[in-house]
């Protein structure tokens, strides 16, 4: 359970609420009340509302005048659309990074992949990923973020961050039980992406990135 007592500044509150939205801390569609959260964090309700407005701008929270804030609804149709857009962004970002990154990028990507696989193997063996799904989510984001990190297109990276967060929220909201078989599958997917990234074969890298997300397409 995250320690919220010391999280009274806006960036820390944003990080905590984002974490909850990405790991099932809010039921999709449920109203998010600023009052109780303000009491929890020891801040004003206006501070919480400001953070929720920021989260609405990246697509994790719905906001409507006179209705307030709600955790974003999930659906297989939306997950499919987001997954397809994510593929387009990640393919372009990864291929450009392959061209630009060199050995430094390859080393960072290898390190990120090693950390991710270690966590995924732990979950696959344990058979219950719920206690560490947040740790895994952070490690997976680091891997995919590193994959596109040398694309030299800041707007692409910024857009990918938002799309990834929305995708992760959809995934958590729709998957009732994604372990252990789920992790055996994605361990293989991430290895294929890693191998393709180091191979220098742009077409192969594009194929593996799409293959990783294809199971979510409708």
Image (cartoon, grey):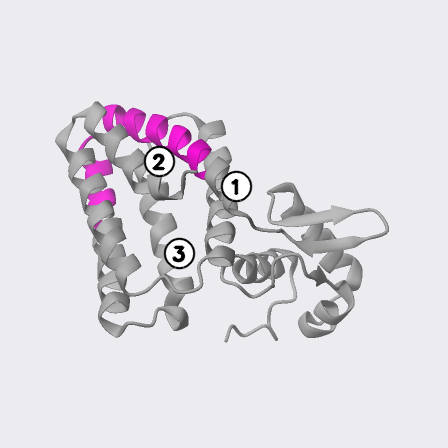
Residue, disc 2:
149
Q: Earlier in the sequence, mark 2 or mark 3?
A: 3
CA distance for labels 1 and 3? 25 Å
Whether residue 15 is visible here, answered yes or no, is yes
**Residue ID for mark 1:** 77
Structural crowding at the residue carrying mark 1, measured as other residues with C-alpha within 10 Å and reported as few (<14), some (14–19) or many (≥20): few
Residue 96, image quadrant: top left
Q: Quadrant of residue 32?
A: bottom right
101 and 212: which is toward the camera: 212
| Mark 3 nearby-residue class (10 Å; few <14, some 14–19, many ≥20) | few
Q: Which residues are magenta?
A: 83-111
Which of disc 3 and disc 1 is earlier in sequence? 1
Q: Residue at x 31, y 34 (%)?
A: 210
Side (left or right) of 10 relative to 3:
right
Element on which disc 3 rests = helix
Residue 75 vs residue 104, the one in the foreground: 75
Q: Quadrant of residue 17?
A: bottom right
Q: Nearer the viewer, mark 2 or mark 1?
A: 1
Residue 54 location (% of width, % of height): 66, 47
155 sits to left or right of 42? left
Q: Nearer the viewer, mark 1 or mark 3?
A: 1
Q: In the rendered structure, which disc, 2 or 1, sits on the residue that comes first in sequence? A: 1
Circle 2 Cα neighbour tier, 10 Å, few/some/many (<14 / 14–19 / ≥20): many
Q: Residue 138 got which mark?
A: 3
Query: Residue 60, percent across and down?
Result: 60, 49
């Amino acid at each position: 359970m995250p320690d919220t007592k010391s999280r009274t500044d806006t960036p820390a509150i944003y990080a905590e609420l984002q974490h909850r939205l990405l790991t099932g801390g809010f039921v999709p569609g449920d109203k998010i009340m600023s009052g109780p959260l303000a009491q929890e964090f020891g801040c004003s309700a206006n501070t919480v509302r400001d953070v929720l407005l920021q989260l609405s701008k990246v697509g994790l929270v719905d906001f409507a005048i006179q209705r307030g804030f709600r955790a974003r609804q999930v659906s297989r149709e939306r997950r499919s659309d987001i997954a397809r857009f994510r593929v387009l962004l990640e393919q372009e970002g990864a291929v450009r990074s392959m061209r630009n990154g060199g050995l430094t990028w390859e080393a960072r990507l290898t390190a990120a992949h090693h950390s991710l696989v270690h966590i995924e193997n732990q979950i696959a063996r344990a058979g219950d990923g719920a206690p560490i799904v947040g740790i895994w989510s952070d490690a997976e984001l680091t891997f995919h973020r590193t994959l596109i990190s040398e694309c030299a297109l800041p707007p692409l990276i910024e857009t990918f961050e938002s799309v990834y967060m929305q995708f992760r929220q959809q995934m958590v909201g729709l998957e009732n039980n994604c372990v252990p078989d789920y992790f055996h599958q994605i361990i293989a997917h991430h290895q294929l992406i890693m191998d393709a990234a180091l191979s220098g074969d742009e077409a192969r890298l594009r194929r593996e990135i799409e293959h990783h997300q294809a199971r979510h397409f409708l």
